[in-house]
Image (cartoon, rainbow, N blue to C red):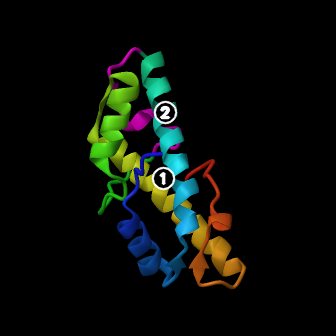
Amino acid sequence: MENLIVLSKVKKFIKDKADCNTSSGFFEPLNADIIKSCRDAVTHAQKLGRKTVMGKDFNLYVETPVDEVLVVASKVKKMIKDEAGLSTSAQAIQQLTIRVQTICLAAIENAKADKRKTVMDRDFVAPTSLT
């Protein structure tokens, strides 16, 4: 499975937000979630007859700019192009980054609730809403 997240930036995001470490097992479910989100967005764009995946194609759309992208934009764009022949807007990359941030923040809370300083795969929860 192609890795669509920037591991070093995600680790840094978690470290900066909560001074927590990150186990390597955390990245597999995170990456799988991002791939699924991309595929769901492609399906939505295709249903609407568009040739570009946009930010509003993601199920948890939020109009918030991001400071630092946490996904590999070129790999996301390549996956979408290869699988569906669609283009990808910059806003789609921002929506994926917001999703990664949301997942990481929830995982941090789960680790803290277990009194751990390491975010692990068991702390991963796919978001159903962005709060």
Specify the label residue 39 is tagged with: 2
Does the magenta stretch mainly form a helix, a strand or a loop? loop
Q: Between residue 53 and residue 3, name the one nearer to us.
A: 3
Q: Residues within 10 Å of mark 1 (few under 14, many from 20)?
A: many
Q: Is residue 24 above or below residue 131?
A: below
Instruction: Residue at the far front: name it.
Output: 1
Q: Is residue 58 magenta?
A: yes
Secondary structure of the residue carrying numbered label 1: helix
Q: Between residue 35 and residue 3, name the one nearer to us.
A: 3
Q: As drawn, is 18 to the left or to the right of 70?
A: right
Instruction: Residue at the far right: name it.
Output: 114
Write the start and end of the magenta stretch as one range.
Answer: 49-61
Q: Is residue 13 above or below residue 126?
A: below
Q: CA distance from mark 1 to mark 2?
A: 14 Å
Residue 77 pos. (x, y %): 31, 38
Any part of residue 53 in sight: no
- Asked whether the residues under the numbered discs 1 and 2 touch, taking CB atoms below 8 Å apart as contact, a structural biologist would say no
Residue of label 1: 99
Residue 21 pos. (x, y %): 51, 80
Q: Between residue 11 and residue 18, name the one nearer to us.
A: 11
Quarter of the figure that contains the C terminus: bottom right
Residue type for callout 1: Arg
Residue type for callout 2: Arg
Of marks 1 and 2, which one's residue comes earlier in the chain? 2
Residue 10 pos. (x, y %): 42, 66
Q: Quadrant of residue 106?
A: bottom right
